[in-house]
Image: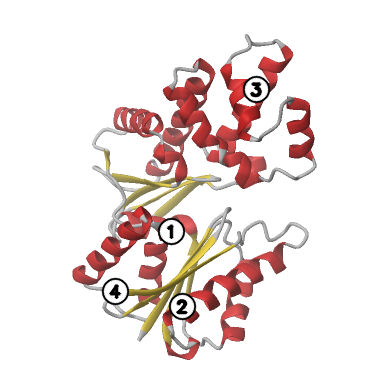
Amino acid sequence: MYIVGVDGGQSSTLALVANSKGKIIGSATAGPANHIHEPGGPERCRRALTDAIGGALKAAGVAAADVAGVGMGMTGARPLMQAIAQEVLKTLGCAAPLNFAHDSVSTLEGALGGEPGCIVISGTGSVALARDASGREKQTGGWGYLFGDEGSGWWIGVELLRAASRQADGRDPRGFLLEAVLRHFAVTRIEELHLRVYSGEVDRPQIAGLAKLADQLAKEGDPSACAILDRASEALVELAASALKHVDLPHPLVSYAGGVWKSDRVLANFTKGITQLVPGANVVAPLMSPAGGALLLGFKAANISPTSEVRRALAEQLKESEKS
């Protein structure tokens, strides 16, 4: 009996195959599957899911017909995306039940091992989800790069580009931030970078990747980068606090996921901010990755309650894979 878990983000799509004992035996990564309402979006989603799931099954040496349950946590989950997912599974020959959810659901599932609490995701985009013991849920954020994504890698990247343009104009004192951004993209003039961004040559994931540069610059003491990361932390605190207002969690566990949290500054400021704003809140490191949460959704789809040993096995393997 085998379980498939799929984590579909704005930068990539990861599929895992595990057996009933929690041993991960296959994995594959494909391109992003979100923004399906853009031109070419449905086909991009279909291709990403087909490549990721098909590749993971092949790596595991498992036939699609032998899968007992599939869990999917997808950024921007919409009915059209779910329909495409069901179509892909059928095409691959998989008739297993599908537990399809927004990626905040699978990420919360993995981070807290199924326990109630709150998850704050800050990767390319940003979203928070709180769930109490009764099953009541509240999501905040998740509106995408035009309507929201405050505190996300995308948001940080755009703010860094804005700071660079202000320095190029002379509206702010010229510092090493501008030079660092130009070096990052291997250009000598910001006008060249401007053209590459607006032509689409530099895409959203690449702009979100600037969050790592912002963190590096902040560590070096750049005041603009420090201010950007501090505002990102405030935005993420706001997401979590707003979600927690709508559920009954007197002493909520709050966890996090996404590349932005690799910044010690963001995590420290967030921890300080949320514990001040929500008395009793306890910020904890995630037990397992969003892909692990997707596998747990897959176990639910197969009507299997994974034991603590299975959950521990999944968490250990996923942490090892993150190190490699």
Q: Which residue in the structure is indicated by mark 2?
A: 59
Q: Where is residue 224 in the image (x, y as percent from the top left)?
A: 54, 18
User: On the rendered image, what quadrant is the C terminus found in?
Assistant: bottom left
Which mark is nearer the camera, 2 or 3? 2
Q: Identify the element where label 3 is drawn.
A: helix
Total label count? 4
Q: Which residue in the structure is indicated by mark 3?
A: 164
Q: Position of residue 146 (x, y in %)?
A: 67, 41
The answer to whether the residues at label 3 and label 1 have Cβ atoms under 8 Å apart is: no
Q: In which quarter of the image is residue 32?
A: bottom right
Q: How far apart are marks 3 and 1 (CA)?
A: 36 Å
The answer to whether the residues at label 4 and label 3 have Cβ atoms under 8 Å apart is: no
Which mark is nearer the camera, 2 or 1? 2
Q: Which of marks 4 and 2 is nearer the N terminus?
A: 4
Left or right position of 192 against 317: right
Q: Which of marks 2 and 1 is nearer the N terminus?
A: 2
Q: Identify the element where label 2 is drawn.
A: helix
Q: Distance between the residues labelled 1 and 4?
A: 20 Å
Q: Which residue in the structure is indicated by mark 1?
A: 105
Q: What residue type is labelled 3?
A: Ala
Relative vertical location of residue 180 with respect to residue 120 in this rendering, above or below: above
Q: How far apart are marks 2 and 3 (CA)?
A: 44 Å
Left or right position of 226 against 39: left
* Viewer-proximal residue among 86 and 140: 86
Q: Distance between the residues labelled 4 and 2?
A: 16 Å
Q: What residue type is labelled 1?
A: Val
Q: Identify the element where label 4 is drawn.
A: loop
Q: Which amino acid does label 4 sit on?
A: Gly
Q: What residue type is labelled 2?
A: Ala
Q: How far apart are marks 4 and 3 (CA)?
A: 47 Å
Viewer can see residue 148: no
